[in-house]
Image (spheres, helix red, strand yellow):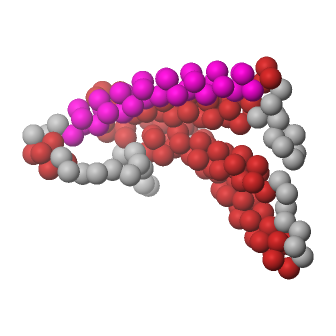
Amino acid sequence: MAALLHSVRKLSNIPVLVACAALFVLMVMTFCDVILRSIFNAPIEAATELTRILMAILVFAVLPVVSARNDHIAVDLTDGLFARYRLSHIRDGLIFIGSGLMLYWPIKRVWVLAERARDYGDVTEYLAIPQFYVGWFITVFAALAAVAMIVTGLLHFFAPHLLTERRA
């Protein structure tokens, strides 16, 4: 089991690299758009739709990794209470499993919207990129986040020692 988790942790770098590439492309495109707009009065016309697509890639590519690593923004108002009664693992496990299960509805809805865009032949305005690809990407990575959260929640209950990454 530990070897499997080690392999999954190594593979989790792939979506992070995809998000990094999307951020870099977004950065370069924005820089070029500002220069072209300011100096030559010739902005990149497709910059808005590319920004939307790249932001979706950026956010949803890292969602499973952020979810599994518990890197979310958290408010710790009740941490002292749960730590005092040694209930932190139970709380965390329930929250992970509940959150993973609740992602079913957004996943289902985005999938329906992506299929509708595919059926209607919706494309972006300037580059004619089919919009359902972005919907499918969001659906797949939200589903991966749901699975990651449910597995992490189960690990909180049954094998909390596997959640800490040992450094050699």
Residue located 36% across and 45% down the image: 164
State yes or no: residue 109 in magenta.
Answer: yes
In the depicted structure, whether residue 55 falls above or below residue 68: below
Residue 27 lies in quadrant: bottom right
What residue range appears in magenta? 88-117
Residue 153 lies in quadrant: top left
Q: Where in the figure is residue 43, as x and y percent of width and height?
A: 84, 66
Q: Assign the C terminus to one quadrant of the image.
A: bottom left
In this orientation, which residue lies closer to the viewer: 120 or 16? 120
In the depicted structure, whether residue 42 falls above or below residue 127: below
Q: Where in the figure is residue 35, as x and y percent of width and height?
A: 81, 75
State yes or no: residue 135 in magenta.
Answer: no
Q: Residue furthest bottom?
A: 39
Residue located 14% across and 50% down the image: 80
Q: Where in the figure is residue 53, as x and y percent of width and height?
A: 72, 46
Residue located 28% across and 51% down the image: 75
For the image shown, how many numbered marks are present on the structure? 0
Residue located 23% across and 32% down the image: 90
In this orientation, which residue lies closer to the viewer: 56 or 41? 41
Q: Residue furthest front?
A: 41
- For the stretch drawn in magenta, the main secondary structure is helix
